[in-house]
Image (spheres, helix red, strand yellow):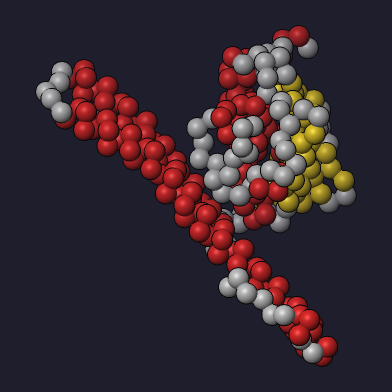
Amino acid sequence: MGERLDLQATPPEMLELANAFNGMLNRLEADFQRLSEFSADIAHELRTPVSNLLTETQVALSRPRSTGEYQDTLHSNLEELERLARMIADMLFLAKADHGLLPNPAEPVHLEREVDALLEFYEALAEEKQVTMQLNGAATVTGDHLMLRRAIANLLSNAVRHTSPGGTIDITITQARDMARLCVSNPGETIPANQLPRLFERFHRADNIRSHHGEGAGLGLAITQSIIKAHGGDVAVHSQDGLTTFCLTLSRSGRQGASHRHGADADDE
């Protein structure tokens, strides 16, 4: 698969076909490489929780223990099992997305309401980190509100995790013609330009920048992209001068709205 047709030795009348054939081989080779990396990543991500479960269980069984000690072991194992369950559920979700099996309801979704509900959910964590979250704008789109909420939640979770204390996360909803755009911007370490195209790959986490801020498997942004694409939309990211912005673009119908504020200094307004 690594070989290509020699274009210099190809007759002129066959040059276009040879170029197309080489292009096909390039795509196939890239797909096989991604599949190989994906399999290796799955093995790596599953190895840690399984190893922890084995070690905890072996230690617990090495000698008789009190009821409290066994309970502590079970609680520890439960955390690892929950981590495995989340990872498997995320992988199954992505598999459904790949095969076009995600639900396709056409209900009106008020983006500002979904964001407001999520801001309330993350408010305690934001206050703990001394981070402010503010929302401006509103728009209504057509789709599945639970899936869209999940896509937005992944962006907000990342933003809260990577914003330094005292920073402000801005969520902006705008609309133009038949499209709505929701952008989440947070101050923090700039993501290197060579990492940006890979952020939406499964199990990928930008080296030395965002990977050390959480224990996620690196599937959140891949899920967000799958959800938005299932809604006929697009997702993009920009990171420069200490500000990272993720934008979701969706078909919409609706109105423009007001401004809301949550977080560390919400009472100041």
Q: Is residue 181 above or below residue 94?
A: above
Front residue of 207 and 187: 207
**Residue 224 visible, this angle:** no
Q: Quadrant of the N terminus?
A: bottom right
Residue shown at 61% from the left, 32% from the top = 208
| Residue 170 x, y percent position in the rendering | 76, 27
Residue placed furthest toward the front: 9
Residue 29: percent from left, percent from top:
60, 67
Quadrant for residue 19, please give it: bottom right
Residue depicted at 53% across the width and 60% down the height: 35
At horizontal 65% and vertical 36% (from top left) the residue drawn is 155
Residue 247 in the image, given as x and y percentages of width and height: 75, 41
Out of 84 and 141, give the one closest to the viewer: 84
Examine the image and state in which quarter residue 68 appears: top left
Tally the marks. Answer: 0
Q: Residue at x 77, y 27 (%)?
A: 242
Query: In the orientation shown, which residue stands out farthest toward the top?
Result: 268
Percent coordinates x, y for residue 160 in the rendering: 64, 26
Q: Is residue 124 visible?
A: yes
In the image, residue 232 above or below residue 189 = below
In which quadrant will I find the C terminus? Answer: top right
In the image as oriented, which residue stretches furthest toward the right? Answer: 177
Q: Is residue 48 left or right of residue 112?
A: left
